Image (cartoon, rainbow, N blue to C red):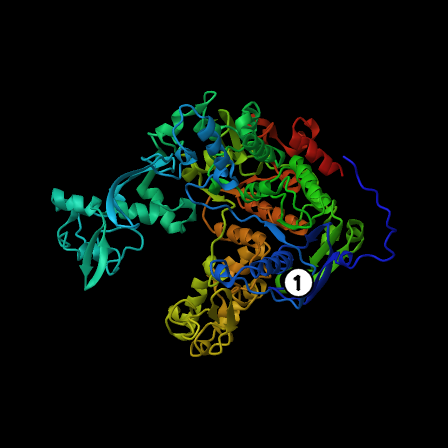
């Protein structure tokens, strides 16, 4: 191929298009940002640092990424925008130089029971096509291998609207891959009827024991009582066989209750639709407790947990069915796909192999495609989302990452760094919110926000290089080279928790004694079996209740704009009672969600105006001026403050307020102490949960669960979202818990926590089927001295630096 030779002279001046090399942000005021103005270089790696709550996410996600997405949405027609999420313009004066933003955050993936790693990444879709082309015996199109597609058969007459209309007899069939017994969930449930009702009572006497089913509930209890199908005054145990069948199993039937048409349905299918069709982890705590009491989930006996119908399981390629392929470790599946030599499907094999190799490259080769997506950690979910971007030909795109090293062992952080640098080197702008010094070290540009959190943050403390950050004197700069020293003396155990024959997931018949009365850290590379050992065998084990195990995992805190730290922690209850007692009125008056709510905004503090396809407008309520309460309620005072002023207090001020004097309330003071202990002293009591960062939410959850009475606390990566300066405070908190006579077991990758431990249990040596074994048990000093594992090598390098 010949190539033309350029003869034109070089341009004397740069092209006008080359002058847009910066993303300019002026006057950003989202959440706690205080008129922030910065310039970010394009096609470079910029890391945003600062203590948790300093405004990093507000600047990167809520300002830059949000405005880019809003501008892209505006390019669509008004008709299409009506179907899309409405986005308001961020609180910012000027945003220039934006490019298309791809956000890779840590939001958990869909918790639908049928959502798996394979369905979330399109790997399953490609496998289904592969088996529909090569599988023997051939059973049908790709849908015949899909556990989300049921088989359908229909026969009857249809009328064809063409020429002379006439009825035509026809038969319609569709072969789906869904197991008919479990409906593609892989598990079946048996319901304990004694947990649903008390059969010695009648419906009128309140026989139902289901949460939320009150005797006056129009949509539940009264449908049964007034349907005419049952005698509401007869004890359930005296029902006839027909009445019992109608009560438990009747198909949906239209009935009239007080002149209103309602649907009557048997109790068992109604409970299944109301509770069992939803992911258990997404339920409210009291509903989840009811489901765990009333329902037992077992592997489907018909499909053996594969979710697939018999036909889909019978079709194979070289002796492997699609169920076998999805159950393989992805690294093994990649080897199998690489060995298939079928020219007729070569493009499909190439694409599928690239996707599977991306899993391996990003450190997720230990997963299987049939792993439910709701069971992935935040870090795993984030890396799964990254897969579709690896190898992409797009350039001049802005990638935004939220702490991409969360859940990664120090051994894996270098691999993540390589991926970030590769995205940058292709000509993309990479923006990363991160606390880990290993990632900060590779940045081309650093923006440090602070100096504190909440109202004490929201300003830019430093912009520049890593060396400049070290010399800059900011909180991040001072702590960048912090290294926790190994303990000189460790605590002696007061007992042991024995785990025997653990085989959850990839564990290989593990026997281990977990010491009590000390700080134990369970570590190992991602996928080595840490969570399987602790959550599967210890927290979920038979002796967990006897040992008083309290598990604080990484599950997301769900909350609306009406939820705040006071409501989530239960702090508002003693505060309301204290106000009620001091003023001789009902506690309900001091709730913005109850009798005390402003009637104009219903206690929201703002009035929303829906503008269809455009972003809705929220204006401060003129009646209550955003205070959320009726004016009459604000006349009642406690210690000279009204309820709105108390909810506007930071935790540290409220701790002092409720600790002494007229407002002294010990129950409230205890909760505030715990919030201050976990480093949330700057939060205001009434701050909406929707405005909290990921790290703040996790620490809020930690403070709440610490109130539970237990002898053993299990924490899952408590340093996630924590700034370097906050890790020291966390270690002090863990020490206080242990010194109070409790036992603490921490799943953790952070070397500072490992160095501070009394005992370390290291799993490995690798991930998936290369892990699942105990490779070290002992003190941190012994681990460093031996250097016999990957963790030992990295911990030795950490303490020696």
Instruction: State whether residue 711 appears in this view.
Output: no
The picture places residue 677, in percent across and down from the top left corner, at 58, 54
Foreground of the two, 634 or 262: 262
Foreground of the two, 466 or 792: 466
User: In the image, what residue occupies the spot 54% across and 24% down?
Assistant: 342
Relative to 653, 302 lies left or right = left
Residue 272, above or below 344: below
Residue extending furthest top? Answer: 319
Where is the N terminus found, in terms of image quarters? top right
Q: Residue under circle 1?
A: 458
- The image quarter in which residue 589 lies: bottom left
The picture places residue 467, in percent across and down from the top left corner, at 80, 49
- The image quarter in which residue 24 lies: bottom right
Residue 297, above or below 656: above
The picture places residue 747, in percent across and down from the top left corner, at 56, 39
- The image quarter in which residue 542 lies: top left
Relative to 12, 56 lies left or right = left
Residue 6, above or below 461: above
Foreground of the two, 55 or 382: 382
Instruction: State whether residue 135 appears in this view.
Output: yes
Foreground of the two, 260 or 350: 350
User: In the image, what residue occupies the spot 39% across and 25% down?
Assistant: 314
Count of all numbered marks drawn on residues in the image: 1
Relative to 771, 3 lies left or right = right
The picture places residue 538, in percent across and down from the top left corner, at 47, 35
User: In the image, what residue occupies the spot 46% across and 61% down?
Assistant: 567
């Amino acid at each position: 191929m010949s190539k033309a030779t350029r003869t034109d002279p070089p341009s004397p001046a740069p092209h006008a298009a080359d002058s847009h090399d910066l993303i300019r942000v002026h006057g950003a005021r989202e959440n706690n940002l205080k008129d922030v103005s910065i310039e970010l270089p394009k096609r470079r790696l910029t890391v945003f640092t600062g203590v948790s709550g300093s405004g990093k996410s507000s600047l990167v996600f809520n300002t830059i990424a949000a405005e880019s997405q809003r501008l892209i949405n505006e390019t669509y027609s008004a008709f299409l925008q009506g179907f899309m999420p409405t986005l308001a313009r961020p609180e910012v004066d000027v945003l220039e130089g934006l490019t298309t933003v791809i956000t890779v955050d840590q939001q958990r993936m869909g918790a639908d029971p049928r959502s798996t790693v394979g369905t979330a990444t399109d790997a399953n879709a490609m496998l289904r096509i592969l088996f529909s082309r090569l599988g023997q015996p051939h059973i049908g199109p790709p849908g015949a291998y899909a556990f989300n597609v049921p088989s359908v058969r229909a026969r009857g007459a249809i009328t064809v609207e063409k020429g002379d209309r006439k009825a035509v007899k026809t038969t319609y069939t569709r072969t789906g891959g869904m197991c008919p017994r479990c409906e593609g969930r892989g598990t079946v449930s048996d319901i304990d009827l004694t947990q649903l009702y008390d059969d010695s009572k009648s419906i009128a006497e309140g026989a139902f024991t289901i949460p939320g089913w009150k005797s006056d509930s129009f949509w539940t209890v009264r449908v049964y009582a007034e349907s005419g199908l049952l005698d509401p005054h007869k004890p359930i145990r005296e029902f006839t066989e027909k009445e019992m069948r109608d009560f438990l199993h009747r198909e949906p039937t239209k009935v009239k209750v007080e002149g209103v048409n309602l649907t009557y349905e048997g109790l068992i299918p109604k409970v299944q639709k109301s509770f069992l069709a939803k992911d258990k982890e997404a339920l409210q705590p009291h509903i989840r407790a009811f489901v765990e009491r009333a329902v037992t989930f077992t592997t489907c006996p018909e499909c053996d947990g594969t979710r697939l119908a018999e036909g889909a399981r019978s079709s194979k390629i070289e002796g492997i069915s699609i169920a076998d392929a999805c159950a393989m470790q992805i690294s093994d599946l990649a080897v199998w796909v690489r060995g298939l030599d079928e020219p007729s499907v070569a493009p499909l094999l190439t694409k599928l192999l690239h996707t599977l190799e991306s899993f391996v490259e990003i450190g997720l080769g230990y997963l299987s495609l049939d792993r439910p997506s709701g069971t992935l950690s935040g870090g795993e979910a984030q890396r799964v989302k990254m897969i579709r971007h690896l190898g992409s030909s797009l350039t001049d795109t802005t990638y935004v990452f939220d702490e991409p090293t969360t859940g990664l062992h120090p051994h894996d952080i270098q691999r993540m760094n390589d991926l970030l640098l590769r995205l940058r080197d292709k000509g993309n702008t990479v923006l990363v919110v991160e606390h880990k010094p290993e990632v900060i070290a590779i940045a081309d540009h650093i923006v440090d926000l602070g100096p504190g959190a909440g109202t004490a943050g929201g300003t830019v403390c430093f912009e520049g290089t890593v060396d400049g950050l070290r010399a800059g004197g900011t909180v991040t700069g001072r702590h960048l080279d912090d290294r926790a020293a190994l303990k000189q003396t460790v605590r002696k155990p007061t007992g042991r928790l024995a785990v025997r024959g653990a085989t959850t997931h990839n564990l290989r018949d593990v026997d281990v004694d977990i010491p009590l009365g000390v700080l134990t850290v369970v570590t190992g590379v991602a996928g080595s079996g840490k969570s399987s050992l602790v959550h599967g065998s210890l927290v979920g084990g038979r002796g967990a209740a006897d040992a008083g195990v309290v598990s604080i995992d990484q599950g997301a805190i769900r909350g609306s704009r009406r939820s705040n730290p006071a409501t989530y922690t239960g702090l508002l209850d003693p505060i309301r009672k204290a106000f009620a007692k001091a003023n001789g009125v009902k506690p309900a008056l001091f709730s913005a969600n109850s009798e005390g709510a402003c009637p104009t905004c219903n206690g929201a503090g703002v009035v929303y105006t829906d503008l269809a396809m455009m972003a809705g407008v929220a204006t401060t309520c003129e009646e209550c001026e955003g205070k959320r309460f009726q004016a009459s309620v604000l006349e009642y005072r406690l210690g000279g403050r009204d309820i709105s002023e108390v909810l506007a207090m930071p935790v540290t001020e409220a701790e002092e307020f409720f600790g002494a004097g007229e407002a002294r309330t010990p129950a409230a003071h205890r909760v505030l102490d715990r919030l201050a202990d976990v480093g949330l002293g700057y939060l205001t009591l009434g701050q909406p949960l929707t405005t909290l960062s990921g790290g703040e939410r996790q620490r809020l959850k930690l403070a709440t669960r610490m109130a539970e009475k237990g002898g053993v606390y299990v924490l899952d990566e408590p340093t996630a979202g924590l700034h370097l300066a906050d890790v020291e405070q966390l270690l002090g908190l863990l020490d206080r818990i242990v010194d109070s006579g409790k036992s603490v077991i921490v799943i953790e990758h952070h070397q500072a926590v490992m160095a501070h431990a009394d005992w370390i249990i290291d799993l490995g040596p690798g991930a998936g089927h290369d892990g699942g074994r105990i490779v070290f048990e002992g003190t941190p000093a012994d681990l460093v001295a031996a250097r016999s594992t990957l963790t030992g090598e990295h911990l030795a390098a950490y303490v020696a630096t």
